[in-house]
Image (spheres, grey):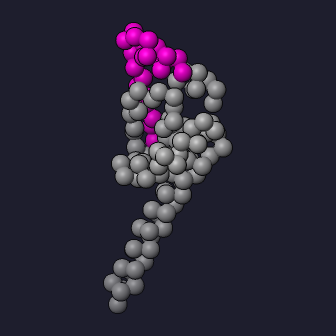
Amino acid sequence: MIKKILTPLFFFIIIFVSNLEANNLQESIKSDHRSTINTTRDDSRHPYETLSFFEIKPEMTVVELSPGGGWYTEILAMYMYDEGRLIAAPYNPALGDYAQRSFKNFVKKLKSD
């Protein structure tokens, strides 16, 4: 009898928690803090589907390699702010012009937010 009651309750809790987490990710994606340039790219980049596929959770430590213009950084920084840790690892600017431009643009992005 107890098993019949607890089993559906257990599945409800799992679904409820998953939905809370999904909403948190959706809120990060739809947040006003993101730049218009980056949000217009969401339709072609599918951030929710991509981050869900990789099972990114807000309590994780995530290393973003070569963050470039900060498109993922905008989403992940808000999503992981309370519990997780986001480490941005840009190219070494000594590697050439592209790496220098990329690094400067990323630093500019961080200062603007």
Residue extending furthest front?
Answer: 44
Task: Report whether 25 appears left or right of 7.
Answer: right
Can residue 81 be seen here? no
Q: Residue furthest right?
A: 32
Q: Considering depth in this image, is 110 or 58 the residue closer to the camera?
A: 110
| Residue 21: % across, % down | 49, 57
* Quarter of the figure that contains the C terminus: top right
Residue 26 location (% of width, % of height)? 54, 53
Q: Is residue 92 magenta?
A: yes
Q: Residue at x 36, y 79 (%)?
A: 7
Which stretch did the figure color magenta? Answer: 84-105
Q: Which residue occupies 41% across, 48% down?
A: 50
Would residue 43 be seen by someone viewing this image from the given angle?
Answer: yes
Question: Does the stretch in magenta take in 6?
Answer: no
Total of numbered circles in the picture?
0
Can you say whether 82 is above or below 109 in the image?
A: below
The N terminus: image quadrant: bottom left
Q: Is residue 100 above or below residue 34?
A: above
In the figure, 26 relative to 87: above or below? below
**Residue 87, percent across and down?**
43, 31
Which is nearer the eye, 40 or 49?
A: 40
Query: Residue at horizontal 54%, vertical 42%?
Result: 41
Which is nearer the eye, 36 or 58? Answer: 36
> Residue 19 location in percent, x, y?
49, 63
